[in-house]
Image (cartoon, helix red, strand yellow):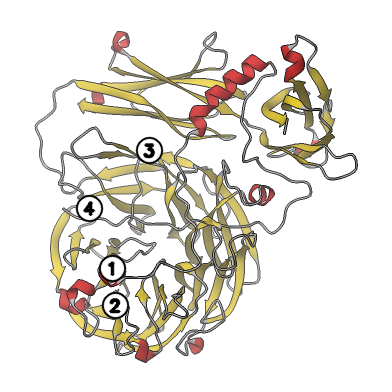
Amino acid sequence: MRKTFRKKGVAFALALAMLCSLGWTGNAHAEEAAGAETTEMVEAATAMDALQAAPPDGETQATETLPELEEDEITVESNLTGANNQLFKTADGYELLVWNHSEKTLTVEKYDNSLERKSASVIDTAYLLPKGAESKDVLLGGIYEGTDYNFVVTGRHNLNEDDSVCTLRVAKFAKDWSFVAACDIGNQDDVEIYGVFQACGIDFAEQNGILWISTGRTGYGSGGYHHQGKMNLIVRISDMTLLGSAADFYHSFSQYLTVCNNQVYQYELSEGTRKLLLERLDAQNYTGGWNYNWAAGAEEFISVLDCWSTDEYGMWSYAMHADTVGLSASDTKGRLLTAYVSKDQQALQQNGGDETNLAKEMWVASTTTDLGDTTYTKVSDIDICSYDYYLVKVNDNKFAVLWGVQAYVDYTHSAPRSYATPMQYVCVDAYGNRLTDTISLDAELGPYQPVTDGNGNIVWCVDEYNETIEDNEPVFYTLNTDSGTVTKKNPNAKETPTPAPDCNVTYNGIYIPKADQTGVTAIMDVQLDGDASCVDYSWYATKDNGATWIQVADWNGNRFINWTPKESGDYILVGKVRKNGDDAGAISKAVNFTFHPAIKGICQMPYTGEGGGYLIGVESYDNPGNAYSYEMLILDCTLLAQNKPAWIYTTGQCKTSGSCLWTIWQPQYGYYWTLFRIYDENGTMIDEKCYPFVNAY
């Protein structure tokens, strides 16, 4: 059985440079509902509970110092942000490198171009040990299959801060994986390491006979603190000589390298500076040791994003609410592409750092190679529980951004089974312009960086539980980015008896990974025992409690939908599953969701100007030609309970320049509902949203 180490992303906050004038995008404490009457509001708010009970997004906050490494933690697996198993495209197929941490072995699995397994061999661990290290101490840093040679970087902790200890080894192998030479590195080479590969990624690049390596570590202690930071190394490939190093202690958690027109560039997330940095590297700056300058080793650098922050947590510990995704380049266009995931930074700043209920967004930035100009493209809103983000170069003017949507696990079996919801991707050109819409696929991303096959296809693999293959053996996916189709390959599949032409169905419910202004994605949580081709699915929706129904999808073989309703409001979505043609035996499940195509955010906050009261606002996603009208109404719940006229305030339908409308209101003590509405250029209401408001404290 193989053991896979899944990517452990460190999520941080990115900031947009400044708030737009009176702009606002969301409220952390708003409860969504639609309708003006109290009964309808309560029902709508109840219906939203299921939607808002989403799993956490997995964000973590870095601490002032990384945890101390105890003596018995020497064999604890390195916490790299990259995977310890890696997939590579070769001239005659593919190679999957599998690291077994318990046994300290590295296995090379070879597959042909059809992804049929050809062979597997184990590299002698002795070649991977830093000088003087025992096998129990070795940790894998990363693997790189270069132009003429392959390289494996390993290391070990140095808890006694012994300058004589070799903490790193860069092992060089021929293309047939026969050992050639190695470069052993330690503090005697001005590479100071206390904890190796700590809270970081690792990446490689080749340029003019030099191997560039970027990763991270914690350094020697000072006053009980062992700070983490970036560590870059350059090694001459011909004789495996360390030419120099550059390092800092600015808490760099992800590192990417690429070469564009024979120049090396780096992209890193630097928590110590609260920036996403894009750097042009210069080997002349690799003078050894560490320094006080962030972007160590750079000839020139820019900030792709300055991250919004407060001083609440101190300079060295702030959740930046975003993940770096990747770095790539186009030689012919002279552009560097960086991708990242971010919470809505304007809303984050407005909420004082409270990220509750804030959406995630996928961005691509395209920068000129002189670092003089950067353009930004928001390529997609993404599910709050998305994971495993990748940027993949398809060709010199086509790049794909891929991400997975939260998977769910069935624990009712003796061995838990994981079921994946659709992954998604977007293609962009070298300037970041979208080439495709956001496309959903019934496939799963995992801990292996996807590769391209040279024919416009993207290939990756996951370790998937399946009764027809060996436990946790690799399953490959191939995505054709032109057609948007994906195929799946189980290279180790066992032959099984042909199933009976029947299927038992267990229907657990409906999972909604996305419900926003772009529509809804829904998946039926269905388990099948038998022939899956004997089962089909259909979808219906209603927004008037069943008085009328909308057929979203007729009977077909897909258990998920991507649907954009024509009207805003609260919907009941029904998914049906049946054995082919057996309408009488169809099983139905229902779930609620709310669709808001126009309203981006609503807000109420204390107003400190003359007269006091509250500042109340509504914002739309856009306002074509400033033709939209905005309206805000307020319902007094006390008057409604007394059967008195309860609508006590309205702005009327107002036009505005831009996408925001604000009003100031001085309420009496009591409980209220605020109703926000947006009308198009013809005066037709296109969206409305309700917000409970309390002035009773």
**What label sits on residue 115 in the rendered view?**
4
| Residue 546 x/y as whole percent | 52, 10
The answer to whether residue 101 is above or below residue 481 is below
Rate crowding at label 2 as few (under 14), some (14 to 19) or many (20 or more) other CA atoms within 10 Å: few
Which residue is under mark 1?
73
Q: Give the quadrant of the C terminus.
A: top right
| Residues at marks 2 and 1 touching, judged by CB atoms closer than 8 Å | no
Query: Dot 3: what SS?
Result: loop
Q: Residue at x 39, y 39 (%)?
A: 422
Direction from residue 212 to residue 167 in the image, left or right: left
The answer to whether residue 289 is above or below residue 661 is below
Which residue is under mark 3?
421
Q: Residue at x 68, y 26 (%)?
A: 688
Query: From mark 4 to mark 3, how far is it between C-alphas?
Result: 24 Å
- Three-letter residue code for mark 4: Leu
Select label 4 or label 3 by which is in front: 3
- Three-letter residue code for mark 1: Glu
| Residues at marks 4 and 1 touching, judged by CB atoms closer than 8 Å | no
| Residue 176 seen | no
Ranked by sequence position, the earlier of labels 4 and 3 is 4
